[in-house]
Structure formats: structure tokens, C-alpha cells
Image (cartoon, helix red, strand yellow):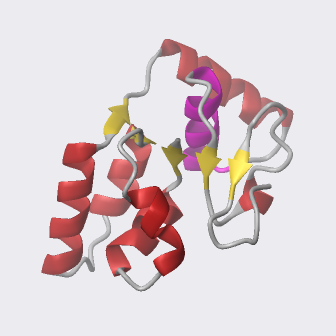
Amino acid sequence: MLLDSNIVIHGAQGEHPALDAILDRTDLAVAGVTQIETLGFHRLSVLERHWLETTFDRVKILKLDEAVTARAINLRQERKMGLADAIIAATALVHQLPLVTRNTADFKHVTGLQLMDPFAAKAV
């Protein structure tokens, strides 16, 4: 499973029991841009920073490579899409992972991308 940045952020806040079963898994990954987006936030508390760093130590961080770059470019050419969202979607597609996100609307147009919203009653 690939975690979207918003899932990691909600996890750091520790206020969302809907995420517990997912965050306890051992097969989690994030795109490198998720690490940048979350740890780069300038108002992180010490506790949030510690939670994020601990989480990034235990999940697989999938770096931006040529295949992900090419897929992200294609996604942005097909439809207006934010850079981070395009990289995250491309990472999930290239590595054939479902994307866990609360913002399914941002990704529903991406053909072949399996979406899971832990806040919804069932996966999308």
C-alpha cells in the first residue's frame, strides 16, 4: 500500500482511529515526495516530527526514478494535476500498489489506480 501525504499527516495527528489498522501494517510505502511534503511543513510540533521520522524509518520510501517521472509527466499532460499528486499517483501505478488517500476525488480520474479511503465505509 502506498500512503498519500494526507494519510501520513492524519496519522501524525493521532486523532483518527480509522487509520490504526492501516498504519500497523508492515507492507507500507510512501513516495519520496510525501516525505518532503510532510517533514517540510514548517509548523510541525516536536511530537509530530518524531512520529513522522519514526514512520519513515519503518516504511519503504519509493524514490523518484525515470519510470515514475515519465508516468507523472503523462498524468499531468492528460489532465491538470498538481505535481505532488502526479508523482504519488505515478509511484502507485509504477509499483502496482493501491493508494491510500482521503482525497479520492483528486485521483479518481487516473486510469488503473486503485484507491482506498480508510475514512469511507469501504474502499473506492
- Look at the image and give the residue range highlighted in magenta: 82-94
Question: Quarter-wise, where is residue 78 in the image?
Answer: top right
Q: Is residue 124 above or below residue 71?
A: below
Judged from this view, the residue extending furthest toward the top is 66
Q: At which x and y percent is residue 101?
A: 61, 58
Judged from this view, the residue extending furthest toward the bottom is 15
Split into 4 quadrants, where in the image is the C terminus?
Answer: bottom right
* Residue nearest the observer in this picture, 51 or 40: 51
* Residue nearest the observer in this picture, 23 or 94: 23
Q: At which x and y percent is residue 6?
A: 51, 65
The tally of labels here is: 0
Residue at 42% in and 44% down: 33
Secondary structure predominantly adopted by residues drawn in magenta: helix
> Is residue 88 toward the left or the right of residue 26 in the image?
right
Question: Quarter-wise, where is residue 13 in the image?
Answer: bottom left
Residue at 52% in and 41% down: 1
> Is residue 61 toward the left or the right of residue 93 in the image?
left
Q: At which x and y percent is residue 84?
A: 55, 47
Q: Is residue 120 magenta?
A: no
Q: At which x and y percent is residue 61?
A: 34, 36
Residue at 26% in and 49% down: 56
Q: Is residue 16 above or below residue 26?
A: below
> Is residue 41 toward the left or the right of residue 7 in the image?
left
Residue at 32% in and 68% down: 41
